[in-house]
Image: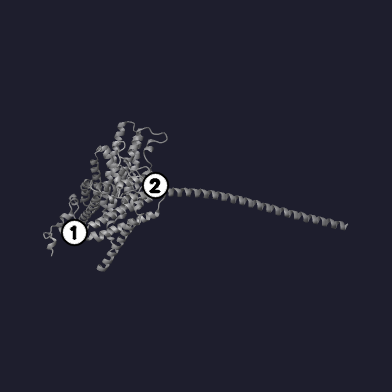
């Protein structure tokens, strides 16, 4: 009986152990199965991530390849364009052929092709570099640029060493900058006020379009249109008078005054361009029935963003769209800003080193006629250098820097005016930005609507408008009326246009450069003479006569030297 129980117990214990082993094997199998499933799921997720990553990389690669191909095609086109322009330049071809090759501007092509539909051609914007930007790709031209930089450094070192050895002090030529750009923070505040006033033009134009659309009678529209034109003229006149009054009241120094008055002129030209360019579209849209999806005033008026971009764009001719670059090259912006600073220092150095010693004594005592003539001819070379520096600073470095910041692609701010053989060609090539505005809104409108194909009167009007604006800037910046530039623009400019019209290229180019150098020297010397005479011999300034009569003529002016004689060379011994 006991043996039976013991056998039964041993059998039950052996069954229990076999069941435990089977349960352990099952759990292990389940665990391994779960691990396999987790691994398979992880692998599937990894495959999905890899597939999405590969798909994303394929898209990025395709997009970058497309951009690279577009850039390559654009660079090839630009390379071919540069080569063509450079070949034409070195062949001494006319600037009109260059402008036609690169898409051309309407101001040049309008003089080489017949008018279409009885109207002069419009300004066309094309993506292109400035001429000097392309020329600097040639190592020979780049070397000339380096030579100018070296000349600046040598002149600077020469002056520093001379002043240190001779006078025991160092003159860095900063005095004209400090004296000229004083109160610049106040000038910036005044510029902000001008900007705000200009922004008010856009809602005013929208109001004119909206009210005109609601006018049902033609008589009401005419009254509203005439009132709006009168309001625009009143706004422009008030704007100019306010800025001039503010410059005089704040007593801004000359350089700050010139900057503010130039910005005033730019705002006036921008407002006129915006209104003049959008009036035809507004008249058409408000006269007809408005479209179904948009009201008439929304169709007739461009967006506010386009107006804002135009206010800052380096052009004075309005368009809804301009050619744009793909990105901002900050290295280009930085280089041009450094050039602007360097050129300002260069001009200040020229004034301090070469011009101030010639004229700083005017007004203290009478100046002999011989000393006056020497001062006049002594300012020819500094005046020519200042002229070239001002051109490079404003029309190349500053305009290209602002264009790069705004991604403005059409950078034809000037042509090869240095190759001009006539004064008319020089006027068209020297400052393309201002010339395009004068051509589009003064000359073109005068020929088509005012003088009816009388181009001579339209040309006289262009010269008169340009001379008036130049003289206003100088007269109120220096606080005296000395119409040297007005005479040069209005009389000498028109005379040179006819004198140099039929000259050969070589003779015309030599005469043009001679007139530019002498004209800049005379202008710079006369303005400096009057400026220092008014500082050394101040007037009351209470009457208008004080601003109109030159002090350099009345207060310790020029006296004739009776001993100033001319001797023949053989009489000198």
Residue 83 location in percent, x, y? 36, 50
Residue 145 location in percent, x, y? 32, 57
Q: Residue furthest right?
A: 1
Q: What residue is disc 2 on?
A: 324
Question: Looking at this view, is 55 or 428 the one in front?
Answer: 428
Q: Which class describes the residues within 10 Å of circle 2: few (<14), some (14-19), or many (20+)? A: some
Residue 438 location in percent, x, y? 28, 44
Q: What residue is disc 1 on?
A: 374
Residue 252 numbered mark, or none: none
Q: Quadrant of the N terminus?
A: bottom right
Question: Looking at this view, is 82 or 125 the one in front?
Answer: 82
Query: Which type of secondary structure does the marked residue at label 1 adopt?
Result: helix
Q: Which class describes the residues within 10 Å of circle 1: few (<14), some (14-19), or many (20+)? A: few
The CA span between labels 1 and 2 is 51 Å
The image's colouring method is one colour
Query: Which type of secondary structure does the marked residue at label 2 adopt?
Result: loop
- Kindly identify the residue that appears in the image at 35 percent across and 41 percent down: 203
Looking at marks 1 and 2 on the same chain, the residue that comes earlier in the sequence is marked by: 2
> Is residue 246 among the parts visible in the rendering?
yes
Q: Residue furthest top?
A: 217
Q: Quadrant of the C terminus?
A: bottom left
> Is residue 268 among the parts visible in the rendering?
no
Q: Residue furthest left?
A: 562
Question: Looking at this view, is 374 or 135 the one in front?
Answer: 135
Q: Quadrant of residue 443?
A: top left
Q: Residue furthest front?
A: 91
Do the CB atoms of the residues marked 1 and 2 lie less than 8 Å apart?
A: no
Residue 544 location in percent, x, y? 19, 49
- Kindly identify the residue that appears in the image at 36 percent across and 38 percent down: 300
């Amino acid at each position: 009986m006991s043996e039976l129980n013991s056998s039964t117990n041993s059998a039950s214990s052996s069954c229990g152990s076999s069941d435990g082993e089977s349960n352990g094997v099952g759990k292990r199998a389940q665990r391994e199965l779960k691990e396999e499933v987790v691994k398979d799921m992880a692998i599937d997720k990894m495959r999905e991530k890899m597939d999405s990553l590969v798909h994303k990389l394929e898209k990025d690669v395709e997009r970058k390849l497309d951009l690279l191909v577009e850039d390559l095609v654009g660079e090839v086109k630009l390379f071919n364009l540069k080569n063509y322009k450079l070949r034409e330049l070195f062949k001494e071809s006319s600037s009109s052929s260059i402008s036609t090759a690169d898409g051309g501007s309407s101001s040049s092509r309008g003089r080489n092709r017949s008018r279409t539909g009885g109207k002069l051609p419009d300004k066309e914007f094309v993506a292109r570099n400035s001429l000097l930007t392309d020329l600097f790709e040639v190592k020979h031209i780049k070397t000339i640029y380096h030579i100018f930089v070296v000349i600046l450094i040598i002149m600077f070192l020469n002056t520093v060493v001379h002043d240190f050895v001779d006078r025991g002090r160092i003159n860095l030529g900063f005095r004209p900058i400090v004296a000229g750009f004083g109160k610049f923070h106040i000038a910036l505040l005044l510029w902000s006020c001008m900007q705000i006033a200009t922004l008010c033009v856009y809602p005013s134009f929208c109001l004119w379009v909206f009210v005109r659309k609601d006018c049902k009678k033609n008589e009401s529209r005419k009254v509203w249109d005439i009132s709006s034109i009168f309001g625009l003229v009143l706004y422009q006149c008030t704007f100019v008078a306010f800025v001039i009054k503010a410059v005089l009241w704040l007593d801004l120094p000359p350089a700050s005054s010139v900057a503010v008055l130039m910005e005033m002129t730019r705002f006036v030209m921008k407002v006129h361009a915006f209104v003049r360019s959008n009036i035809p579209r507004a008249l058409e849209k408000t006269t007809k029935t408005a479209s179904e999806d948009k009201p008439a005033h929304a169709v007739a008026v461009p967006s506010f963003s386009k107006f804002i971009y135009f206010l800052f764009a380096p052009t004075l001719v309005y368009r809804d769209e301009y050619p744009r670059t793909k990105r901002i090259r900050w290295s280009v912006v930085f280089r041009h800003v450094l050039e602007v600073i360097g050129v300002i220092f260069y001009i200040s150095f020229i004034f301090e080193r070469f011009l101030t010693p010639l004229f700083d004594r005017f007004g203290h005592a009478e100046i002999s006629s011989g000393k006056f003539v020497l001062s006049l001819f002594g300012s020819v070379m500094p005046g020519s250098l200042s002229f070239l520096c001002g051109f490079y600073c404003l029309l190349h470095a500053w305009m290209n820097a602002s264009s790069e910041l705004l991604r403005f692609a059409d950078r034809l701010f000037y042509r090869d005016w240095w190759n001009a053989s006539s004064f008319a060609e020089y006027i068209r090539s020297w400052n393309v930005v201002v010339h395009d505005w004068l051509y589009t809104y003064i000359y073109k409108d005068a020929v088509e609507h005012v003088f009816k194909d009388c181009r001579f009167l339209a040309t006289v009007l262009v010269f008169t408008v340009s001379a008036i604006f130049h003289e206003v800037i100088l007269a109120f910046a220096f606080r005296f009326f000395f119409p040297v530039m007005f005479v040069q623009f209005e009389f000498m400019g028109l005379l040179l246009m006819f004198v140099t019209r039929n000259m050969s290229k070589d003779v015309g180019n030599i005469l043009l450069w001679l007139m530019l150098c002498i004209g800049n020297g005379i202008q710079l010397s006369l303005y400096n003479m009057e400026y220092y005479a008014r500082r050394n011999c101040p007037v009351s300034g209470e009457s208008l006569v004080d601003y109109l009569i030159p002090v350099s003529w009345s207060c310790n002016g020029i006296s004739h030297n009776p001993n100033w004689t001319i001797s023949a060379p053989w009489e000198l011994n």
